[in-house]
Amino acid sequence: MRPSSLPFPLVFAWRVFIFFVVVRALMGVQGTTLFAGKHPIINPYYQNILINAGIAIILAVSLNLINGITGQFSLGHAGFMAVGAYISAYFSKEIGGVLFAQLIALISVHISKQLGTLLLTFQQPILFTIAILVGALAAGAAGFLVGLPSLRLRGDYLAIVTLGFNQIIVSLIRNWKAVGEASGYIGIPKFTTFAWVFALAIACIWSIRNLASSALGREMRAVRDDEIAAEASGINTTRVKVVAFVYSAMWAGVAGALQAHYIQYANPNDFTFLRSVEVVVSVVLGGLGSITGSALSAAGLTVLQEVLRDVPGAFYTSVALVGLAAYWNFVRVKSEQSGSKSMLRAFVVPFFALIAICLCYWSPQVNAVLERVFPRLDLPDLRAALESSKGALRYVIYSVILIVVMLLRPQGLLGRREWSLAALQRGRRVGKGVEGNLA
Amino acid sequence: MDFNGALLAVTSVLELKDASITFGGLRAVSPLSFAIPQGQLAAIIGPNGAGKTTVFNLLTGVYAPTSGEIWLDGQRVASAGKTIRPNALVKRGIARTFQNIRLFGDLTVADNVRAAFASHQSYGFWHALLQTGKMASVESAIEDETQRLLQVFGLTNRAENLARNLPYGDQRRLEIARACATNPKVLLLDEPTSGMNPSETADVTRTIRLVREQLGIAVLLIEHHMSLVMEICERVIVLDGGVKIADDVPSAVQNNPQVIAAYLGSDEPELNAVIGT
């Protein structure tokens, strides 16, 4: 359905309708559902992963607007997130409830008691909506402040400024008495559900896709490619950059609000530079400038962290070693020749070598044979060492996987292309770009 | 607006009035005056360091003049120490290309042209966000204009290529097409044929004629290819050391002893041949 084929309000109403049908279906009828009830199909653990993935998607897709589409390197996304988290949490904990109660009292007395009762039943969604909006606006204001230096700075310099901004925000929170200083802000009401996260993640992707496929998105990409030429082509580069920063920061604020109202706790340490880097990683991994790429990689990385938590040490150690070996081989082979055959060899050889090593350690028989053949070889008890360090190792693997992916696909998983169902139906796996597919 | 300005507004699209610029102790351009009438094709020539590109940067708002004024289409756009931003100047009707081609490399050819409609055919943030009917109608107007420009410049079959993958000659043509998409009254071309072979140069020459004849835009170009200047320009302004030393029809400039001296450091008559074609 193209915007031009039907009157706009009709199309828009149709989209909103479909959207609510989907959300409603996910929330389900009482009792028997995917998410709620005594035996939900998606249990709380999986729900937790999905919610974290949704928050990561909002962060990555919104950062992509600055880093990928407008080409300004921002390294302070967690700072905006912190502003959104703390401001919205402060609102719903200290201000919202009291204000709402007074409002209900006023309405019940002066207008109608029924309206008051009706509003009271919707207290939670109304309060949460306002809290998210307040958080988003505060983060947007912070984005405006940081957007201003971006008018003068480029590349590394801007990255340092945004990083500094992130640190300033964290330091301010650590010294802000009303929100618990460094020990964290406790007692935030639990408002976030999967439906909220799902709805907002869709809204985030939808709105940023719309921006990217509009004239404004074209101007943003023009600024990315050549700022001087963009200015000389009549593009107001100041406006373009500030819009990108503010809008992106607002969504980071939304993500922060969702997180704070989900874990019911906010700690300044959750919003440091490391969190920002995590977001940058998912944007770069998905492909700078690809919205679907950011969404896929953000979801993928969240799931990966959980998957790695559960697998036995052996498996992920072998993945890590295969990765390292492949990397070493890849560098070596690439310097000599290139081609798919040598790439294959780069993986196959170390893979079998690794299986052999694992067999030696894990099979008592093989181990016994080895000890008989090489009696003086004092084999370290690698197995015990690995099993005791499960949790720590997953970050090693996580990083190794990132390194391998970036080596094999430096442009990111999707490059600058977009993935869409429409393209899939036409028999093309991957579309040509935002311009071609999403307009 | 004084009487003189009002009179000139009718006849010229672009005018420098005693504009000069000084960087620290260096006077790059001494008070310089000239006016470009509607639809004229003029060239600025001069030896290296004469201040040609500096004049372009003054005209496009990159620098503010130290003294003097610049008038564009009957409005004063720059005076001593003050100028308006390049993108705002584009809106008033001045467009330029760069000595080293500056395209939006990772955008398609068509998108390069579409991006240049920003100053005069646009819609706001909310229309973009909600994909409104206004966006659809403006986009379709942009699309029509883009296709027309691509047609005029012979880039239609390249429309979906990435700009950075174009051959050099096509890149220059696209840069000119993009500049024309801003709907200018005067187009500034900074060495449009630099680094080009004879056939590419001939192609650019055709393109410049096209801009003037089909689109009716005044063209001011900086050029070192004297054959091109003598062939297509109606007027040649010669700068040397930031001072205008000649401003006349090409044949007269060709024989101007001052010009010859500026280029060759002597006024020996037999050297005329080098300046000529």
Image (cartoon, coloured by chain):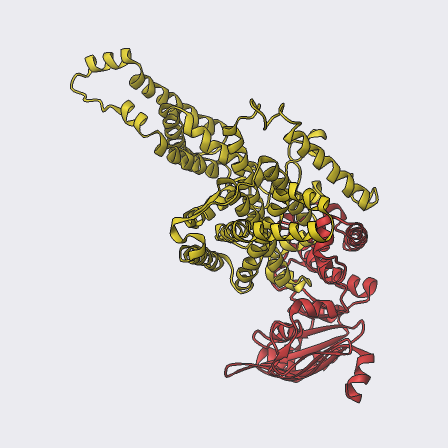
Pick the quarter of the image with the N terminus of chain B: bottom right
| Residue A328 quadrant | top left
Residue A402 placed where, x, y %?
A: 45, 37
Nearer to us in this view, B205 or B59 = B59
Nearer to us in this view, A420 or A143 = A143
Q: Is residue A84 left or right of residue A229?
A: left
Q: Is residue A119 left or right of residue A315?
A: right
Q: Which residue corresponds to the image point at 65% horizontal and 40% vertical from the top-left? A: A121
Residue B183 placed where, x, y %?
A: 77, 64
Res. B194 in view: no
Pick the quarter of the image with the C terminus of chain B: bottom right
| Residue A437 quadrant | top right
Residue B225 placed where, x, y %?
A: 66, 67
> How many discs appear?
0
| Residue A115 quadrant | top right
Task: Give the letter of the yellow chain.
Answer: A
Task: Give the letter of the red chain.
Answer: B
Res. B32 in view: yes
